[in-house]
Amino acid sequence: MIQPETITCLQTAIAGVTTSEFRGQTRAVVPAAQLADAFRLLRHERGFDLLVDITCVDYLGYRGAADRFGLVYLLANTSTNERLTLRVYLNEPDLTVPSAYPFWNGADWLEREVYDMFGILFAGHPDLRRILLPEEFTAFPLRKDYPLQGRGERHNFPVLTRDRS
């Protein structure tokens, strides 16, 4: 359960924050331009010391969706047992947000995975490169406009041969 002071502090300090609750889980939507401020406030003033996960949702073709991508941060305060889902909505062509790495070092590989699968860029990340796919891979396979059978990217990969002797 989240403390009401956390939500009040977030809404007071950052313009445009909206919050909702469902089954005891609190969600806050933060404008992309204010994301670094939200990280700073939650980490340093409200004690959210654990970045549990970062993921992304592609809302392409989703009925009623106003934005293409929803970036999701799951945060926890291990002292007070508070949990917060932080969301940021993005649209092409501007798919860049500030990196959470300066606030939680655990964001390193999580941001690289989101970059690799969705193409979201994290400004200020110390080593933003593909983590699951080869650098030669030019697409983002978890986007909904990526074809189920792929685009034939395998011709770009080096052929591996195994010595059978």
Image: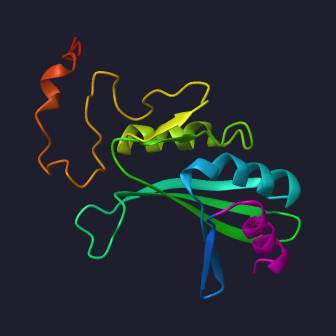
Q: Is residue 95 above or below residue 16?
A: above
Q: Is residue 80 visible in this depiction of the protein? A: yes
Picture mark count: 0
Colouring used for the render: rainbow
Measured as percent of width and height from the top left, residue 32 is found at: 55, 51
14 within the magenta span: yes
1 sits to left or right of 150:
right
Relative depth, front residue between 55 and 68: 68
Magenta stretch? 1-15
Q: Residue 122's spot in the image, x, y percent?
A: 53, 37
| Quarter of image, res 124 | top right
Farthest residue, direction bottom: 23
Q: Is residue 49 visible?
A: no
* Magenta stretch: dominant secondary structure: helix
Residue 44 as seen in the image, left or right of residue 109: right
From this view, report whether residue 105 is shown above or below residue 32. above
Residue at image coords 61%, 36%: 108
| Along the viewing direction, whichever of 50 and 87 lies nearer the viewer | 87
Residue at 85% in and 51% down: 44
- Quadrant of the rendering where the C terminus is positioned: top left
Give the residue displayed 31% in from the left and 50% down from the top.
142
Question: What percent of the width, then of the height, locates residue 102?
Answer: 72, 36
Give the vertical position of 163 relative to 100 (above or below): above
Q: Nearer the viewer, residue 154 or 70?
A: 70
Q: In the picture, residue 13 is in which quadrant?
A: bottom right
Q: Which image quarter is the N terminus in?
A: bottom right
Which picture quadrant has residue 67? bottom left
Residue 125 position, x and y percent, is 60, 30
Q: Is residue 51 left or right of residue 135?
A: right
